[in-house]
Image: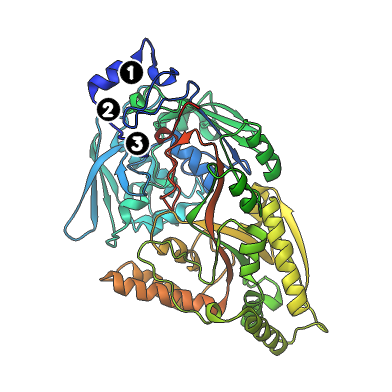
């Protein structure tokens, strides 16, 4: 149920009622579909954990990005199909050599305090994200964007003003690349590239994102934040397309227990929550209009700590191969999760645009064959029931992660004779421990930052900020760099196939499954972008119909 982002002036005028909008009236109808709109346009949803930050330069998780897309608007957005649509930029031009992107900014974009949004706001934000002093966890993303001078800026060897971004005038933002990236514009939908209000950042420092301080340019403003409990966003009256926004308020509630969240959803307290692990078959039968399952551009996997200071057994490729072989992915997706997820034998999901899943030996074997080979490999490495490996699986607190860890630990014990314990941590502590290499095996999930295979495979580069396994392979680094200058899609696809084959052989990570979006979504919430595999949803594009 797509609707246009621009209304005719006459239509918009009819909808205005005093200082408010007729969208809040029980008799208002949707301008395109004709559906009667609910009188209360509040969207309330559950998140598992508090995000580490909602500062665009510091956002590093999915939940934080969801908030970021409400509060801030970048150069480009996505529609319900995942296609690029204008954001602050009305469009862009690419030079003949593909090395220069020139974005034209709309002249009616404003910050929530009334200041105009200008090209200099983007220059400031991108330089800030690359500044070593900020220590952005996603600064490496700017390197992936191949912005001129970025690596020297990130390392502190060059000043910020050498970064290849400029503002010839208030409405023109120019990016100079070192490599022509055909998917560069897609990357500008990521939170790291969103603008920030320089005066506010400089006035309030690390507290600039507090509700009483924040100035933002998205469709919503932050009006309340109770850490570890709730976050409230309300309509930004200064937003350039505010007259066509229907949802008035967005509330995210931190609920760590997925079963508690389901109970609150069924009680009418939530409009959306994740389906608890294993309960989709039952819920889809009981609530066929509300239980959803659709493919996502995400992979669930385990990191094996292959750093020099990691466990000795982890340095043996045969052991890592055995661990991957002994994971019965069919049991995980069919019996534990039961939400339509797909067994993963490659890091990159099949839903990735232009990606053809390569043949890897493990994928074509039966589980009995995998188990037999796993036992042989462990024996060759000197391990088995008489000399068991003792290890720990680290995961962030979640019933689903716990059930998966229990299932895999049992598989490894039964097949390989391993002694496996599991340990959970609160989200932010978990991120720090995993990033610092304070684990032996750790749970991980990755959702694509843009719809191209490099968004996954670049994590296997030794210099990636999210290469938490500590994996380093000179050939992988070299060919991933070559992919950026590949002359054709076919050449690039060949490189991605090779990286997946190396990863399947060396196993620094163990792919387990590819995600589906498994939600309970109230049937009065319309226009959820189920066809956007990135699940970059924008509250301003949703609306609620009257029951």
Depth check, mark 3 against mark 2: the one in front is 2
Is 63 placed above or below 513 here? Answer: above
For the point 51% across and 36% down, which residue is it? Answer: 523
Q: Position of residue 17 (x, y in %)?
A: 36, 12
Considering every residue shown, the one lying at the far top of the view is: 18
Label 2, on which residue?
A: 7
In the image, is 420 to the left or to the right of 435? right
Label 3, on which residue?
A: 121
Q: Secondary structure at mark 1?
A: helix
Q: Secondary structure at mark 3?
A: helix
Q: Residues within 10 Å of mark 2 (few under 14, many from 20)?
A: some
The quadrant in which the N terminus is found is top left
For the point 64% across and 47% down, which residue is it? Answer: 428
Alpha carbon distance from label 2 to label 1: 10 Å
Q: Secondary structure at mark 2?
A: loop
Label 1, on which residue?
A: 15
Q: Are marks 3 and 2 in contact (CB under 8 Å)?
A: no
* Sequence-wise first label, 1 or 3: 1
Q: Position of residue 190 (x, y in %)?
A: 41, 47
For the point 63% across and 84% down, which residue is it? Answer: 369
């Amino acid at each position: 149920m797509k609707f246009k982002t621009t209304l005719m002036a006459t239509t918009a005028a009819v909808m205005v009622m005093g200082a408010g909008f007729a969208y809040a009236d029980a008799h208002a109808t949707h301008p395109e579909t004709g559906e009667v709109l609910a009188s209360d346009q509040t969207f309330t949803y559950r998140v598992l954990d508090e995000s580490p930050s909602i500062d665009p330069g510091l956002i590093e998780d999915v939940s934080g990005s969801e908030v970021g897309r409400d509060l801030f608007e970048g150069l480009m957005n996505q529609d319900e199909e995942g296609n690029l649509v204008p954001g602050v930029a009305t469009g862009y031009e690419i030079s003949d050599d593909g090395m220069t992107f020139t974005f034209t900014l709309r002249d009616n974009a404003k910050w929530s305090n009334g200041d105009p949004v200008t090209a200099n706001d983007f220059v400031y934000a991108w330089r800030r994200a690359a500044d070593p002093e900020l220590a952005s966890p996603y600064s490496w993303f700017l390197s992936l964007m191949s912005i001129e001078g970025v690596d020297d800026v990130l390392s502190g060897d060059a000043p910020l003003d050498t970064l290849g971004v400029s503002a010839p005038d208030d409405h023109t933002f120019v990016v100079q690349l070192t490599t022509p990236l055909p998917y560069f514009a897609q990357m500008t939908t990521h939170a790291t590239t969103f603008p920030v209000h320089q005066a506010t950042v400089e006035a309030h420092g690390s507290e600039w994102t507090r509700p009483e301080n924040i100035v933002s340019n998205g469709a919503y403003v932050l009006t309340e934040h109770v850490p570890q409990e709730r976050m409230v966003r309300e309509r930004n009256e200064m937003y350039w397309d505010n007259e066509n926004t229907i949802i008035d308020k967005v509330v995210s509630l931190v609920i760590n227990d997925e079963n508690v969240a389901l109970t609150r959803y069924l009680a009418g307290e939530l409009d959306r929550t994740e389906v608890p692990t294993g309960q989709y078959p039952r819920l889809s039968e009981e609530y066929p209009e509300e239980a959803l399952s659709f493919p996502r551009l995400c992979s669930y996997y385990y990191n094996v700590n292959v750093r020099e200071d990691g466990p000795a057994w982890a340095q043996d490729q045969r052991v890592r191969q055995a661990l991957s072989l002994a994971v019965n992915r069919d049991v995980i997706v069919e019996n534990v999760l039961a939400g339509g997820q797909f067994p993963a034998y490659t890091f990159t999901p099949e839903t990735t645009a232009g990606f053809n899943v390569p043949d890897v030996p493990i994928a074509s074997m039966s589980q009995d064959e995998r188990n037999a080979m796993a036992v042989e490999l462990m024996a060759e490495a000197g391990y088995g029931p008489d000399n068991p490996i003792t290890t720990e699986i680290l995961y962030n607190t979640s019933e689903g992660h716990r059930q998966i860890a229990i299932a895999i630990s049992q598989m490894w014990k039964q097949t390989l004779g391993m002694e496996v314990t599991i340990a959970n941590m609160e989200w932010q502590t978990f991120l720090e421990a995993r990033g610092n290499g304070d684990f032996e095996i750790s749970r991980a999930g990755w959702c694509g930052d843009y719809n191209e295979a490099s968004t996954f495979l670049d994590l296997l580069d030794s210099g990636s900020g999210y290469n938490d396994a500590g994996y380093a392979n000179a050939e992988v680094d070299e060919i991933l760099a070559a992919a950026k200058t590949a002359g054709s899609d076919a050449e690039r696809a060949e490189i991605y196939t090779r990286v997946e084959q190396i990863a399947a052989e060396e196993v620094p990570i163990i792919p387990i499954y590819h995600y589906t979006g498994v939600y309970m979504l109230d049937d009065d919430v319309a226009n959820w972008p189920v066809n956007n595999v990135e699940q970059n949803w924008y509250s301003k594009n949703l609306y609620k119909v009257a029951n």
